Amino acid sequence: MSLDAPIMRGVDLDDDRTAKPVTATETVYEGMIWDVRRDTVDLGSETVQREFIEHTGAVSVVALQESPGTPRAMQVALIRQYRHPIGATEWEIPAGLLDKEGEPPLEAAQRELAEEVDLTARTWHVLADFHPSPGAMSEAIRVYLARDLEDVPAEDRFEREAEEAGMSTAWVDLDEAFAAVLAGRVGNASAVIGILAAHGAKEADWVTLRSADAPWPAHPAHR
């Protein structure tokens, strides 16, 4: 890149979501949750083959409450969950797959918040949308902000299984979580992006927030 490369400002920062033509496709591996697909893609200048994981997409939730007795201070709900592929127990925010047919993303986020941390929220907004690994999978993730929280009644709480059965939860000061992300102590993608976005939105007095039902162009099924 040269020093006189074009300078991009404002409205120029929009991803071009025009897909290149696919001339052939096949499923090369069928897994328990995800499949691996091989596409032949016409790039215009040449034709290439690309293998990637077909992913349903996911949602995650930054749940915030005010810190008692501290004006403008916020606490974020975090969970600790073991993740076998990386051999680590991570600090995360509530999250889950869009694997229920016909379930809108917001409803999926509301379900995951209730199932993973026993909370409901009266106020919802979109914080961020991202692709965690666009060179390897089709996954798109939407991060919601949930506020005005209430506990799920004890009799209605979800019974957790497998890795979720051993999850622990904690309220963490948002500024401390922000510092932990910048220090590299928290590495989960949804948590990193959600905490950074929530911290930035708070500093901007929440004017950056999008409606909870805002279009989701990064996920083809929810544009």
Image (tube, helix red, strand yellow):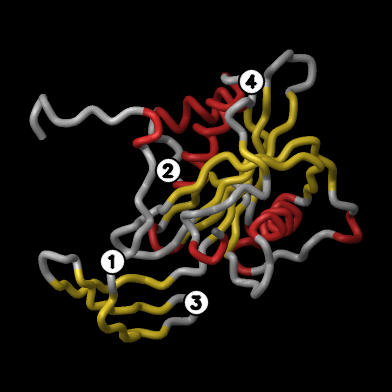
Question: Mark 2 and mark 3: span between their CA atoms?
Answer: 23 Å
Provide residue 222's location: percent of width, then percent of height: 57, 61
Instruction: Report whether 24 appears left or right of 219.
Output: left
- Which one is closest to the eye, mark 1 or mark 2? 1
Provide residue 190's location: percent of width, then percent of height: 50, 47
Disc 2 target residue: 187
- Which one is closest to the eye, mark 4 or mark 1? 1
Asked if marks 1 and 3 touch (Cβ < 8 Å), the reply is no
Dot 2 crowding, Cα within 10 Å, few <14, some 14–19, many 20+: some
Asked if marks 3 and 4 touch (Cβ < 8 Å), the reply is no
- SS type, badge 2: loop
Asked if marks 4 and 1 touch (Cβ < 8 Å), the reply is no
Q: Amino acid at mark 1?
A: Lys
- SS type, badge 3: loop
Question: Mark 2 and mark 4: span between their CA atoms?
Answer: 26 Å
Q: Amino acid at mark 4?
A: Asp
221 versus 101 height, above or below = above
Disc 3 target residue: 33
6 versus 57 height, above or below = above
Instruction: Report whether 221 appears left or right of 66.
Output: left
Disc 4 target residue: 205
- Which one is closest to the eye, mark 2 or mark 4? 4
Q: Amino acid at mark 2?
A: Gly
Quadrant location, the C terminus: bottom right
As rendered, which of 212 and 137 lies closer to the eye?
A: 212
Where on the picture, by quarter, is residue 161? bottom right
Quadrant location, the N terminus: top left
